[in-house]
Image (spheres, rainbow, N blue to C red):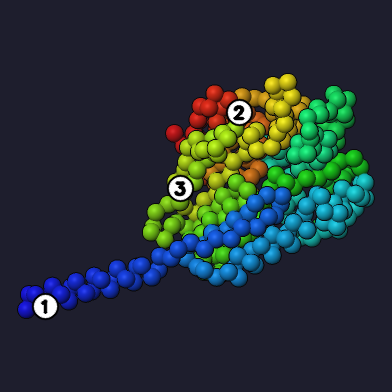
Amino acid sequence: MKRLSRLILLCFILILLCGCSITIKEPFSKTGFYFDTVMTITLYDSKDKELIDTCFDYCKDFENLISRTISTSDISRINAAAGSSVEVSDTAIELLKKGIEFGELTDGAFDITIAPLVELWDIKNNPGNVPSEADITDALSHVNYKNIVIDGNTVKLTDHKSAIDLGGIAKGYMADQLKDYLLREGVTSAIINLGGNVLTIGKKPDGKNFNIGIQKPFDEQNATITSVSVKDSSVVTSGSYERYFEVDDTIYHHILNTETGYPCDNGLLSVTILSKKSIDGDALSTACFALGLEEGQKLIESLEDIDAIFVTQDYEIIDTRD
Protein backbone atom coordinates (compact mmCIF):
# COMPACT_ATOMS: atom_id res chain seq x y z
CA MET A 1 0.00 0.00 0.00
CA LYS A 2 2.82 2.37 0.90
CA ARG A 3 4.58 1.49 -2.34
CA LEU A 4 1.38 2.26 -4.31
CA SER A 5 1.05 5.59 -2.55
CA ARG A 6 4.64 6.46 -3.41
CA LEU A 7 4.03 5.56 -7.07
CA ILE A 8 0.91 7.71 -7.18
CA LEU A 9 2.84 10.61 -5.63
CA LEU A 10 5.69 10.13 -8.11
CA CYS A 11 3.28 10.16 -11.05
CA PHE A 12 1.66 13.32 -9.72
CA ILE A 13 5.05 15.06 -9.49
CA LEU A 14 5.94 13.97 -13.04
CA ILE A 15 2.64 15.37 -14.32
CA LEU A 16 3.40 18.69 -12.65
CA LEU A 17 6.89 18.77 -14.11
CA CYS A 18 5.59 17.98 -17.57
CA GLY A 19 3.01 20.70 -17.22
CA CYS A 20 5.73 23.19 -16.34
CA SER A 21 7.82 22.17 -19.31
CA ILE A 22 4.90 22.87 -21.61
CA THR A 23 4.64 26.47 -20.43
CA ILE A 24 8.38 27.16 -20.73
CA LYS A 25 9.01 27.47 -24.45
CA GLU A 26 12.04 28.26 -26.56
CA PRO A 27 12.15 32.00 -27.30
CA PHE A 28 10.88 33.15 -30.69
CA SER A 29 12.80 36.07 -32.16
CA LYS A 30 12.75 38.22 -35.29
CA THR A 31 14.91 41.11 -36.47
CA GLY A 32 14.15 44.13 -38.66
CA PHE A 33 15.70 47.49 -39.55
CA TYR A 34 13.87 50.65 -38.48
CA PHE A 35 14.86 54.10 -37.19
CA ASP A 36 18.23 53.57 -38.89
CA THR A 37 19.05 50.75 -36.48
CA VAL A 38 18.65 47.01 -36.00
CA MET A 39 15.55 46.06 -34.03
CA THR A 40 14.89 42.67 -32.45
CA ILE A 41 11.79 41.41 -30.66
CA THR A 42 11.99 38.19 -28.68
CA LEU A 43 8.90 36.46 -27.32
CA TYR A 44 9.38 33.90 -24.54
CA ASP A 45 5.80 32.73 -24.09
CA SER A 46 4.51 32.85 -27.66
CA LYS A 47 5.55 31.74 -31.14
CA ASP A 48 2.93 33.88 -32.87
CA LYS A 49 4.80 35.33 -35.85
CA GLU A 50 1.95 37.72 -36.57
CA LEU A 51 2.52 39.53 -33.27
CA ILE A 52 6.05 40.51 -34.26
CA ASP A 53 5.02 41.26 -37.86
CA THR A 54 2.38 43.65 -36.52
CA CYS A 55 5.02 45.30 -34.32
CA PHE A 56 7.23 45.84 -37.37
CA ASP A 57 4.28 47.29 -39.29
CA TYR A 58 3.74 49.75 -36.44
CA CYS A 59 7.42 50.72 -36.60
CA LYS A 60 7.27 51.35 -40.34
CA ASP A 61 4.17 53.52 -40.03
CA PHE A 62 5.67 55.41 -37.10
CA GLU A 63 8.94 56.03 -38.92
CA ASN A 64 7.06 57.39 -41.92
CA LEU A 65 5.18 59.70 -39.57
CA ILE A 66 7.99 61.27 -37.54
CA SER A 67 11.33 60.75 -39.32
CA ARG A 68 13.13 64.01 -40.10
CA THR A 69 14.66 62.42 -43.21
CA ILE A 70 11.37 61.32 -44.82
CA SER A 71 10.01 64.30 -46.74
CA THR A 72 6.34 63.40 -46.28
CA SER A 73 6.52 62.92 -42.49
CA ASP A 74 4.85 65.30 -40.06
CA ILE A 75 8.22 66.45 -38.72
CA SER A 76 9.67 67.09 -42.18
CA ARG A 77 6.62 69.11 -43.14
CA ILE A 78 7.02 71.28 -40.02
CA ASN A 79 10.72 71.81 -40.74
CA ALA A 80 10.04 72.66 -44.40
CA ALA A 81 7.25 75.12 -43.58
CA ALA A 82 9.77 77.89 -42.71
CA GLY A 83 7.69 79.21 -39.83
CA SER A 84 4.23 78.59 -41.28
CA SER A 85 1.66 76.55 -39.37
CA VAL A 86 1.31 72.85 -40.17
CA GLU A 87 -1.42 70.47 -39.06
CA VAL A 88 -0.04 67.15 -37.84
CA SER A 89 -1.18 63.88 -36.25
CA ASP A 90 -2.02 63.27 -32.60
CA THR A 91 1.09 61.09 -32.33
CA ALA A 92 3.36 63.89 -33.53
CA ILE A 93 1.74 66.30 -31.07
CA GLU A 94 2.22 63.83 -28.21
CA LEU A 95 5.90 63.41 -29.05
CA LEU A 96 6.51 67.14 -29.51
CA LYS A 97 4.93 67.90 -26.14
CA LYS A 98 7.01 65.19 -24.51
CA GLY A 99 10.14 66.59 -26.14
CA ILE A 100 9.37 70.07 -24.87
CA GLU A 101 8.75 68.63 -21.41
CA PHE A 102 12.22 67.07 -21.39
CA GLY A 103 13.67 70.33 -22.64
CA GLU A 104 12.18 72.14 -19.67
CA LEU A 105 13.22 69.40 -17.23
CA THR A 106 16.85 69.54 -18.37
CA ASP A 107 17.03 73.30 -18.98
CA GLY A 108 17.71 72.67 -22.66
CA ALA A 109 20.39 69.99 -22.30
CA PHE A 110 17.90 67.82 -24.19
CA ASP A 111 16.47 69.81 -27.09
CA ILE A 112 14.37 68.45 -29.95
CA THR A 113 15.25 71.43 -32.17
CA ILE A 114 18.84 70.23 -32.38
CA ALA A 115 18.43 69.30 -36.06
CA PRO A 116 20.50 72.26 -37.42
CA LEU A 117 23.50 71.03 -35.43
CA VAL A 118 22.85 67.37 -36.27
CA GLU A 119 22.73 68.19 -39.98
CA LEU A 120 25.87 70.34 -39.77
CA TRP A 121 27.99 67.69 -38.06
CA ASP A 122 26.39 64.71 -39.88
CA ILE A 123 28.43 62.38 -37.67
CA LYS A 124 27.16 59.20 -39.33
CA ASN A 125 28.43 60.16 -42.79
CA ASN A 126 31.19 62.59 -41.86
CA PRO A 127 34.61 61.40 -43.14
CA GLY A 128 36.40 63.66 -40.66
CA ASN A 129 35.46 67.26 -41.36
CA VAL A 130 35.08 69.49 -38.31
CA PRO A 131 32.66 72.36 -39.05
CA SER A 132 33.91 75.92 -38.79
CA GLU A 133 33.32 77.93 -35.64
CA ALA A 134 31.13 80.33 -37.62
CA ASP A 135 28.92 77.53 -38.97
CA ILE A 136 28.57 75.98 -35.51
CA THR A 137 27.63 79.34 -33.98
CA ASP A 138 25.04 79.93 -36.69
CA ALA A 139 23.46 76.48 -36.34
CA LEU A 140 23.45 76.76 -32.56
CA SER A 141 21.55 80.06 -32.72
CA HIS A 142 18.53 78.19 -34.11
CA VAL A 143 18.47 75.48 -31.42
CA ASN A 144 15.79 76.34 -28.88
CA TYR A 145 12.80 74.14 -28.05
CA LYS A 146 10.92 77.31 -27.08
CA ASN A 147 10.70 78.09 -30.81
CA ILE A 148 8.01 75.38 -31.07
CA VAL A 149 4.44 76.67 -30.82
CA ILE A 150 1.62 74.14 -30.55
CA ASP A 151 -2.05 75.05 -30.93
CA GLY A 152 -4.29 71.98 -30.95
CA ASN A 153 -2.92 69.86 -33.78
CA THR A 154 -1.20 72.81 -35.44
CA VAL A 155 2.55 73.38 -35.07
CA LYS A 156 4.86 76.16 -36.18
CA LEU A 157 8.45 77.22 -35.57
CA THR A 158 8.91 80.87 -34.63
CA ASP A 159 12.45 80.73 -36.05
CA HIS A 160 12.15 79.70 -39.68
CA LYS A 161 15.67 78.20 -39.57
CA SER A 162 14.89 76.01 -36.56
CA ALA A 163 14.27 72.34 -37.25
CA ILE A 164 13.00 69.42 -35.18
CA ASP A 165 14.68 66.06 -34.72
CA LEU A 166 12.83 63.52 -32.56
CA GLY A 167 15.60 60.92 -32.75
CA GLY A 168 16.30 61.37 -29.05
CA ILE A 169 12.91 60.01 -27.98
CA ALA A 170 11.47 58.19 -31.01
CA LYS A 171 12.85 54.72 -30.25
CA GLY A 172 11.84 54.96 -26.61
CA TYR A 173 8.32 56.04 -27.49
CA MET A 174 7.95 53.24 -30.03
CA ALA A 175 9.27 50.63 -27.61
CA ASP A 176 6.64 51.68 -25.07
CA GLN A 177 3.90 51.45 -27.71
CA LEU A 178 5.03 47.97 -28.76
CA LYS A 179 5.08 46.80 -25.15
CA ASP A 180 1.52 48.07 -24.63
CA TYR A 181 0.40 46.22 -27.78
CA LEU A 182 2.04 42.94 -26.79
CA LEU A 183 0.56 43.14 -23.30
CA ARG A 184 -2.90 43.63 -24.81
CA GLU A 185 -2.27 40.49 -26.89
CA GLY A 186 -1.49 38.47 -23.77
CA VAL A 187 2.31 38.38 -23.97
CA THR A 188 3.81 38.15 -20.48
CA SER A 189 7.51 37.51 -21.19
CA ALA A 190 9.46 39.32 -23.93
CA ILE A 191 12.34 41.63 -24.81
CA ILE A 192 12.05 44.57 -27.19
CA ASN A 193 15.46 45.79 -28.39
CA LEU A 194 15.54 48.88 -30.58
CA GLY A 195 19.22 49.35 -31.29
CA GLY A 196 20.26 49.35 -27.64
CA ASN A 197 16.97 50.62 -26.25
CA VAL A 198 15.99 47.49 -24.30
CA LEU A 199 12.52 47.13 -22.83
CA THR A 200 11.46 43.98 -21.02
CA ILE A 201 8.01 42.54 -20.48
CA GLY A 202 7.65 40.64 -17.23
CA LYS A 203 10.32 38.11 -16.29
CA LYS A 204 11.84 35.09 -17.99
CA PRO A 205 9.60 32.01 -18.13
CA ASP A 206 11.53 30.43 -15.26
CA GLY A 207 10.58 33.36 -13.02
CA LYS A 208 14.04 34.93 -13.00
CA ASN A 209 14.78 38.50 -13.98
CA PHE A 210 16.26 39.34 -17.36
CA ASN A 211 19.99 40.03 -17.27
CA ILE A 212 20.85 42.91 -19.60
CA GLY A 213 24.47 43.60 -20.43
CA ILE A 214 25.85 47.14 -20.73
CA GLN A 215 28.48 47.48 -23.40
CA LYS A 216 32.03 48.46 -22.57
CA PRO A 217 32.64 51.69 -24.52
CA PHE A 218 34.97 51.40 -27.52
CA ASP A 219 35.58 47.69 -26.94
CA GLU A 220 36.20 46.02 -30.30
CA GLN A 221 34.75 42.73 -29.09
CA ASN A 222 31.56 44.41 -27.82
CA ALA A 223 32.28 43.09 -24.34
CA THR A 224 30.07 44.13 -21.44
CA ILE A 225 31.38 46.34 -18.68
CA THR A 226 28.54 45.43 -16.30
CA SER A 227 25.00 44.10 -16.35
CA VAL A 228 21.66 44.76 -14.69
CA SER A 229 18.97 42.37 -13.50
CA VAL A 230 15.53 43.72 -14.41
CA LYS A 231 11.87 42.86 -14.82
CA ASP A 232 9.27 44.99 -16.59
CA SER A 233 11.87 47.69 -17.08
CA SER A 234 13.65 49.80 -19.66
CA VAL A 235 17.44 49.87 -20.04
CA VAL A 236 18.70 52.59 -22.39
CA THR A 237 22.32 53.58 -22.98
CA SER A 238 23.76 56.64 -24.71
CA GLY A 239 27.49 56.75 -25.33
CA SER A 240 30.21 58.52 -27.26
CA TYR A 241 31.30 55.18 -28.76
CA GLU A 242 28.07 54.67 -30.72
CA ARG A 243 28.69 57.07 -33.65
CA TYR A 244 31.84 59.13 -34.03
CA PHE A 245 34.85 60.06 -36.13
CA GLU A 246 38.38 60.88 -35.01
CA VAL A 247 40.70 63.70 -36.07
CA ASP A 248 44.13 64.34 -34.55
CA ASP A 249 43.43 61.98 -31.65
CA THR A 250 40.20 63.84 -30.84
CA ILE A 251 36.90 61.96 -30.94
CA TYR A 252 33.88 63.82 -32.32
CA HIS A 253 30.73 61.92 -31.42
CA HIS A 254 27.01 62.32 -32.00
CA ILE A 255 25.88 63.61 -28.59
CA LEU A 256 26.02 67.37 -29.11
CA ASN A 257 26.23 70.05 -26.44
CA THR A 258 23.36 72.53 -26.84
CA GLU A 259 25.47 75.27 -25.22
CA THR A 260 28.69 74.95 -27.23
CA GLY A 261 27.50 73.26 -30.42
CA TYR A 262 30.33 70.74 -30.17
CA PRO A 263 30.18 67.08 -29.10
CA CYS A 264 29.96 66.81 -25.31
CA ASP A 265 33.35 66.61 -23.63
CA ASN A 266 32.80 66.09 -19.91
CA GLY A 267 34.66 62.98 -18.87
CA LEU A 268 31.87 60.48 -19.62
CA LEU A 269 31.83 57.56 -22.04
CA SER A 270 28.27 56.39 -21.50
CA VAL A 271 25.12 56.80 -19.43
CA THR A 272 22.56 54.05 -18.91
CA ILE A 273 19.10 54.84 -17.57
CA LEU A 274 16.92 52.30 -15.76
CA SER A 275 13.25 53.27 -15.83
CA LYS A 276 9.76 51.93 -16.37
CA LYS A 277 9.18 53.87 -19.59
CA SER A 278 11.65 53.62 -22.44
CA ILE A 279 10.90 57.16 -23.62
CA ASP A 280 12.18 58.43 -20.26
CA GLY A 281 15.34 56.38 -20.61
CA ASP A 282 15.85 57.59 -24.16
CA ALA A 283 15.70 61.29 -23.30
CA LEU A 284 17.42 61.09 -19.93
CA SER A 285 20.39 59.02 -21.13
CA THR A 286 21.16 61.76 -23.66
CA ALA A 287 20.44 64.58 -21.22
CA CYS A 288 22.55 63.11 -18.41
CA PHE A 289 25.44 62.53 -20.79
CA ALA A 290 25.23 66.16 -21.88
CA LEU A 291 24.94 67.42 -18.31
CA GLY A 292 27.96 65.45 -17.10
CA LEU A 293 28.41 63.29 -14.03
CA GLU A 294 27.67 65.76 -11.25
CA GLU A 295 24.66 67.50 -12.79
CA GLY A 296 23.42 64.25 -14.30
CA GLN A 297 23.40 62.60 -10.88
CA LYS A 298 21.52 65.55 -9.40
CA LEU A 299 18.86 65.23 -12.09
CA ILE A 300 18.41 61.49 -11.53
CA GLU A 301 18.21 61.94 -7.76
CA SER A 302 15.38 64.44 -8.27
CA LEU A 303 13.27 61.88 -10.16
CA GLU A 304 11.28 58.97 -8.76
CA ASP A 305 11.81 55.35 -9.85
CA ILE A 306 14.66 56.22 -12.22
CA ASP A 307 18.32 55.23 -11.82
CA ALA A 308 21.47 55.72 -13.83
CA ILE A 309 24.80 54.05 -14.43
CA PHE A 310 27.59 56.41 -15.52
CA VAL A 311 30.82 55.18 -17.12
CA THR A 312 33.67 57.68 -16.98
CA GLN A 313 36.65 58.06 -19.31
CA ASP A 314 38.66 56.06 -16.76
CA TYR A 315 36.05 53.27 -17.04
CA GLU A 316 34.89 53.90 -13.51
CA ILE A 317 31.27 52.86 -12.93
CA ILE A 318 29.03 55.15 -10.87
CA ASP A 319 25.65 53.54 -10.10
CA THR A 320 22.98 55.71 -8.47
CA ARG A 321 21.44 52.59 -6.94
CA ASP A 322 24.48 52.13 -4.67
Residue lying farthest to the front in this orientation: 221
Label 2 to label 1: alpha-carbon separation: 67 Å
User: Image quarter for residue 121?
Assistant: top right
Q: Please, is residue 65 above or below residue 80 in the view?
A: below
Q: Please, is residue 109 above or below residue 1 in the view?
A: above
Q: Name the N-terminal-most of marks 2 and 3.
A: 3
Instruction: Report x, y in % for residue 141.
Output: 85, 32
User: Pointer 1: residues within 10 angstroms few (<14), some, or many (20+)?
Assistant: few
- For residue 101, say whether it is visible: no
Instruction: Report x, y in % for residue 12.
Output: 23, 74
In the drawing, what numbered circle is on residue 211? 3
Query: Marks 3 and 1: CB-CB under 8 Å?
Result: no
**Quadrant including the C terminus:** top left
User: Pointer 3: residues within 10 angstroms few (<14), some, or many (20+)?
Assistant: few
Pointer 1: what residue?
4
Pointer 2: what residue?
268
Query: Marks 2 and 1: CB-CB under 8 Å?
Result: no
- For residue 42, say whether it is visible: yes
Q: Name the N-terminal-most of marks 2 and 1.
A: 1
120 on left or right of 59: right
Instruction: Report x, y in % for residue 270.
Output: 59, 34
Q: Please, is residue 112 above or below residue 322 in the view?
A: below
Residue type of the residue flagged with mark 2:
Leu
Instruction: Report x, y in % for residue 109.
Output: 70, 34
Query: Marks 2 and 3: CB-CB under 8 Å?
Result: no
Q: Considering the numbered disc 1 on the image, is that residue within a helix, a strand or a loop?
A: helix
Residue at image coords 25%, 71%: 14
Residue at image coords 12%, 76%: 5
Label 3 to label 1: alpha-carbon separation: 44 Å
